[in-house]
């Protein structure tokens, strides 16, 4: 126990000495917090139109101004964070939930039928440029947040399947896995007991990065009208609407864009930071 | 080498084949009856029946799939339901915008990323390195369509250097065409260039840590000679994969960017078709883009073999 | 003429002092051996001379190469010194050459970079150099890539690159450590003759006292960043003034005390019968599947209760594949393997899990052998999984403690994690893990090869004691003949998948019958006998 806690304090100390990681953590926390608070409180009703107050620049009353229907941009951003984060979270969850077991199974039964199917399936999904798959799905099933989640989620499955398969394959050749086999353990047990815990760092780092890509993808889909449908506010659609008024009310385009950039930036910094902190080589050099 | 080539070629054909099945399933089977899907709920039953015959929906699935596949091999993608012209014509016009845009952006991305990545790695932990790291960190976080809007705001609305959108057509002259594609290409390229520069930097740094780099230094090569003669070519091998992937990203990203700039490319075509439920156009554009991506992946595999002698001898 | 003179060299990296007061001198045509265990600073001494130190390092003192003070040289001057006046060969022939350039190009590059001659002449000189290092350009084309050559051939290419401009000083950092003994002997002969012909000074860095005793004119013994003893080789070996030198010497020649009790009658602990292991080979032609590669080709052997059997052979001979087969990690293509007379694994069917508890293993790499996320308690208890009605609670704890104490560790070590232990301690934990279910046989696959000599001697003593006390048999697999000789009763010599010679260890070593065994023994460096 003492050792585990010693490891933990080492991690905390290293984290405190890593400004990029801290910045990423702060930015991510900021947006998650905004999304959570929006359930309880927003400065204005984000769906309420007040044509009289349309296209106002930022002011003390409307911090980020109003849009072409007089809706409060700040409030819309808070609720939009909810959509972005929820879509990205579930989509990455789908990717991990299906991809990791597939990858582990494929690695444990290398050259088996499932391995072959997983790898060819990967190739197939990667052949569809990311958005194209989403477009195809929404073209048939209709636009909406759920279909966006499915479309982004499907694209995440091969990412995690390939990642965990590759890492697991190299772990399978390690001597401690051979020792577990000599101790009579079967491949499922070894996968759960030895392989998965040693993939955790990698999965957390990649999960963070995929999360940020999913936020970008969701914004893109919403921008072309294939994401969450009105009146639910979403960052991507806010940008699409802002485009018409770009010279008249540039603040309408500025703030949702910044929200996306800062969320993605925060997640990327967080992911990079986690990787640095988990890399024993870097940690030793910091100590 | 020939074995490797044939192996990759087989994989290429298989992937294309599988992709065509997926696209066919999604657009022909999942909607149930594509004819009533395309005409909407309130359509006249007789008109739906007519469309069903026109589409050949009374025939078995396998026959329809084969007919579609064989048609495509001969360049016949069917007839657009809304425009009433052959899809190949529609696509042929639009691809003359989308493909140049993608290649333009790919060229920009590569031209920006390579020097940035090399400088950053060669001058590790200097101001130049930190500048590249910071810029790329920001670059990967920016949605390209938002960046496009900012470019329009700055260079079209305020400075009037470029027009805010539209495409004069190649008939207006090559330079005019390229000028119209410049802002879209920059918007597409910068986020991808950030990714590429980061990969280039880390790949080069990894390579500079290798034993053979130390051997080269022990022979008397200077730091920069080692970088150019020994590290760079080895570092490029993983970068090639990313360049291949970028083609796919740029092609897909182009679909969105074309909407920002009102460019008459495949992206606009496909979104109009989605609104009009023109499944035939949707599936044709998608299958074409997939084929393009798979073909580029194949080219990257070949470039891999050319760059890495270890692959030439021993096929995996 | 002095080609290298190092005076009061001190080195720090970051805030960590690495080297202290190093003094070395090498004359033309002289071989200086630097010997020391890992972490003694011998490689960083070499890199100081080359001025290829890591970025955060600072050094003081004087280094003169061929009469020039390197401390006063610009980076440009240093570049023209490297490769021309002083050259270096590294340990890993697999990674020391650039994989995307041909070997001819890489040899010629040394000549071209120093502007000696035209590109075409450089090509011709590269071919001549290949000849000189024993690579016939007629047979091994300069247009080949490094991955197409064997380890020994690559090391010859590295030597050709180093001697291209006839440097006055050559530094070789463990150049033969990664090679087989027969290849090692050839490379050592080559270096020796090149030094004599060109009257180069050679600094030869190694951990292996036996290699250096047969090669060097003078030696320097390093420990913890200091030269603890230096002098003419004969003198150092005769006098051994410093206790560390004596310790190193006795550890290198260490033979554990053993009085084995071997039961010759009854079922053997391990019986291997006509075992064949094949690997599929990659296809070379489109129309014809390649014949599988036969890594183990009809091997039979017995190990008796309490007996230590050695299996020696060079890399690629199939000894590790045979070990995996005996552990039933891979399926057999032919033959069968019996543990205590019961079938454990046979061609056509998977291993019989009931027999698994009879055989355990210790691997080479003390770092890769443990899951870094589990505490030692869980690591060594893992094989208990094999026992039906495995002990629980206090009884389980007692077994864990007993296993730890058997290998010289303490009960409190059970709560620690593996990264808190040194390489030697980790190997003890690996042995504890193998012991915990009291197997009849432990396979030791290069189990002491990664350890420094002093640690190795301790582990050998431990193994010898355990075998006698607990009546465990060993299959001791190693490329290192002297280790096998010190701890085994019987030895098997393996080559190209077959056992070519077998017999009581001392008989085989004193009177080898097979030509291959004779060659192996002749190539193995031994500490020179010196009268005290």
Image (spheres, rainbow, N blue to C red):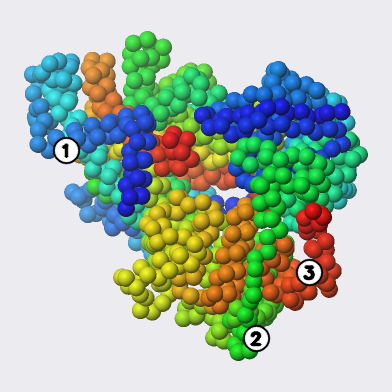
Q: Chain of mark 3?
A: C
- Rendered position, B77 above or below A237: below
Q: Residue at x 71, y 18 (%)?
A: C73
Q: Residue at x 16, y 38 (%)?
A: A36
Question: Horizontal and vertical percent for residue C116?
Answer: 85, 25
Is disc 2 in the same subunit as disc 1?
no
- Return the mark for residue A36: 1
Q: Are marks 2 and 1 in contact (CB under 8 Å)?
A: no
Disc 2/disc 3 C-alpha distance (Å): 22 Å
- Rendered position, A37 above or below C389: above
Question: Horizontal and vertical percent for residue B166?
Answer: 38, 22
Q: Are marks 2 and 3 in contact (CB under 8 Å)?
A: no
Seen from the viewer's position, the closer of residues A255 and C131 is C131
> Is residue C509 visible in this depiction of the protein?
yes
Provide the secondary structure element on which disc 2 rests: loop
- Return the mark for residue C264: 2
Residue pointed to by mark 3: C509
Q: Residue at x 40, y 36 (%)?
A: A272
């Amino acid at each position: 126990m003492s050792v585990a806690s010693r490891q933990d304090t080492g991690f905390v100390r290293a984290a405190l000495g890593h400004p990029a990681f801290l910045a990423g953590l702060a930015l991510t926390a900021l947006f998650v917090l905004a999304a959570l608070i929006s359930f309880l409180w927003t400065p204005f009703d984000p769906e309420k139109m007040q044509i009289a107050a349309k296209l106002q620049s930022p002011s003390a009353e409307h911090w980020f101004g109003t849009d072409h229907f007089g809706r409060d941009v700040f409030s819309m951003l808070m609720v939009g964070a909810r959509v972005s984060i929820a879509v990205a979270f579930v989509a990455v969850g789908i990717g991990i939930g299906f991809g990791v077991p597939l990858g582990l199974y494929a690695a444990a039964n290398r050259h088996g039928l499932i391995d072959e199917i997983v790898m060819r399936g990967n190739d197939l999904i990667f052949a569809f440029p990311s958005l194209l798959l989403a477009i195809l799905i929404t073209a048939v099933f209709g636009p909406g947040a759920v279909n966006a989640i499915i479309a982004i989620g499907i694209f995440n499955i091969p990412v995690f399947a390939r990642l965990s398969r590759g890492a697991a394959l190299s772990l399978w050749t390690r001597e401690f896995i051979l020792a577990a086999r000599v101790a009579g353990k079967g491949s499922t047990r070894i996968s759960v007991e030895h392989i998965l815990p040693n993939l955790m760092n990698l999965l957390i780092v990649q999960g963070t990065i995929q999360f940020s890509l999913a936020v970008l993808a969701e914004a893109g889909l919403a921008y072309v009208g294939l994401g969450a449908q009105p009146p639910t506010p979403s960052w991507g659609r806010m940008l699409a609407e802002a485009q018409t008024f770009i010279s008249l009310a540039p603040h309408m385009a500025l703030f949702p864009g910044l929200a996306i950039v800062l969320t993605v930036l925060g997640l990327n910094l967080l992911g990079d930071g986690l990787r640095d902190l988990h890399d024993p080589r870097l940690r030793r050099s910091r100590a | 080498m020939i074995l490797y080539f044939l192996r990759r070629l087989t994989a290429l054909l298989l992937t294309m084949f599988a992709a065509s099945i997926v696209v066919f399933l999604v657009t022909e089977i999942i909607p149930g009856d594509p004819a009533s899907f395309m005409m909407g709920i309130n359509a006249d039953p007789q008109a739906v029946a007519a469309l069903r015959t026109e589409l050949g929906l009374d025939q078995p699935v396998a026959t329809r799939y084969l007919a579609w596949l064989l048609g495509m091999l001969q360049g016949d993608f069917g007839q657009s339901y809304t425009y009433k012209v052959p899809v190949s014509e529609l696509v042929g016009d639009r691809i003359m915008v989308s493909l140049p845009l993608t290649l333009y952006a790919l060229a920009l991305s590569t031209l920006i990323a390579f020097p940035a990545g090399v400088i950053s790695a060669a001058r590790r932990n200097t101001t130049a390195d930190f500048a590249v790291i910071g810029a790329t960190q920001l670059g990967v976080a920016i949605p390209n369509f938002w960046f496009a809007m900012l470019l329009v705001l700055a260079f079209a609305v305020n400075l009037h250097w470029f027009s805010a959108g539209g495409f004069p057509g190649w008939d207006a002259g090559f330079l005019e065409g390229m000028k119209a594609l410049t802002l879209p290409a920059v918007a597409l390229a910068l986020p991808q260039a950030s990714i590429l520069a980061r990969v280039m930097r880390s790949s080069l740094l990894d390579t500079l840590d290798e034993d053979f780099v130390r051997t080269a230094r022990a022979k008397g090569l200077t730091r920069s000679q080692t970088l150019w003669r020994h590290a760079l070519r080895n570092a490029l091998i993983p970068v090639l994969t990313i360049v291949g992937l970028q083609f796919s990203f740029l092609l897909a990203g182009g679909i969105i960017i074309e909407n920002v700039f009102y460019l008459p490319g495949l992206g606009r075509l496909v979104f109009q078709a989605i609104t009009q439920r023109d499944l035939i156009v949707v599936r044709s554009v998608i299958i074409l883009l997939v084929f393009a991506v798979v073909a580029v992946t194949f080219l990257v595999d070949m470039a891999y073999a050319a760059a890495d002698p270890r692959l030439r001898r021993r096929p995996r | 003429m002095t080609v290298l003179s190092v005076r009061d060299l001190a080195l720090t990296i970051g805030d960590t002092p690495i080297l202290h007061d190093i003094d070395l001198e090498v004359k033309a045509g002289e071989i200086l051996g630097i010997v020391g265990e890992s972490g003694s600073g011998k490689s960083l001494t070499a890199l100081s001379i080359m001025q290829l130190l890591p970025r955060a390092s600072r050094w003081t003192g004087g280094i003169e190469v061929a009469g020039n003070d390197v401390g006063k040289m610009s980076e440009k001057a240093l570049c023209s010194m490297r490769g021309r006046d002083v050259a270096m060969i590294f340990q890993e022939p697999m990674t020391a050459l650039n994989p995307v350039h041909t070997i001819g190009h890489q040899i010629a590059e040394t000549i071209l970079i120093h502007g000696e001659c035209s590109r075409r002449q450089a090509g011709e000189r590269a071919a001549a150099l290949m000849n000189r290092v024993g690579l016939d350009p007629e047979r091994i084309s300069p247009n080949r890539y490094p991955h197409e050559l064997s380890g020994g051939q690559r090391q010859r290419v590295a030597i050709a690159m180093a001697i291209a401009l006839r440097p006055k000083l050559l530094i070789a950092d463990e150049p033969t450590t990664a090679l087989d003994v027969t290849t090692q002997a050839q490379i050592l002969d080559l270096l020796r003759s090149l030094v004599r012909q060109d009257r180069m000074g050679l600094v030869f860095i190694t951990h292996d006292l036996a290699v250096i005793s047969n090669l060097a004119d003078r030696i320097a013994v390093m420990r913890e960043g200091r030269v603890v003893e230096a002098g003419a080789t004969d003198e150092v070996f005769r006098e051994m003034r410093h206790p560390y030198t004596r310790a190193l010497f006795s550890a290198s020649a260490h033979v554990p005390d053993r009085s084995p009790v071997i039961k010759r009658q009854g079922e053997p602990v391990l019986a291997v019968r006509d075992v064949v292991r094949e690997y599929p080979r990659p296809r070379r032609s489109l129309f014809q599947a390649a014949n599988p590669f036969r890594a183990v080709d009809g091997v039979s052997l017995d190990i008796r209760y309490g007996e230590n059997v050695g299996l020696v052979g060079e890399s690629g001979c199939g000894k590790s594949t045979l070990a995996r087969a005996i552990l039933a990690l891979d399926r057999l293509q032919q033959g069968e393997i019996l543990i205590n007379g019961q079938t454990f694994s046979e061609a056509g069917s998977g291993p019989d899990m009931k027999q698994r508890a009879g055989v355990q293993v210790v691997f080479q790499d003390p770092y890769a052998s443990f899951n870094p996320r589990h505490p030692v308690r869980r690591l060594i208890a893992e094989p208990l999984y094999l026992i039906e009605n495995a002990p629980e609670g206090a009884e389980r704890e007692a077994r864990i403690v007993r296993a730890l104490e058997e290998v010289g560790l303490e009960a409190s070590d059970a709560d620690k994690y593996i990264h808190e232990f040194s390489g030697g301690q980790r190997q003890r934990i690996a042995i504890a893990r193998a012991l915990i279910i009291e197997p009849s046989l432990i396979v030791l696959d290069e189990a002491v090869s990664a350890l420094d000599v002093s640690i190795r001697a301790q582990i050998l003593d431990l193994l010898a004691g355990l075998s006698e006390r607990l009546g465990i048999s060993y299959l001791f697999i190693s490329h290192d003949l002297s280790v096998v000789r010190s701890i085994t009763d019987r030895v098997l010599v393996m080559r190209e998948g077959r056992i070519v010679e077998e017999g009581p260890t001392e008989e085989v070593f004193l009177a080898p019958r097979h030509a291959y065994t004779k060659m192996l023994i002749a190539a193995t460096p031994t500490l020179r006998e010196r009268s005290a």
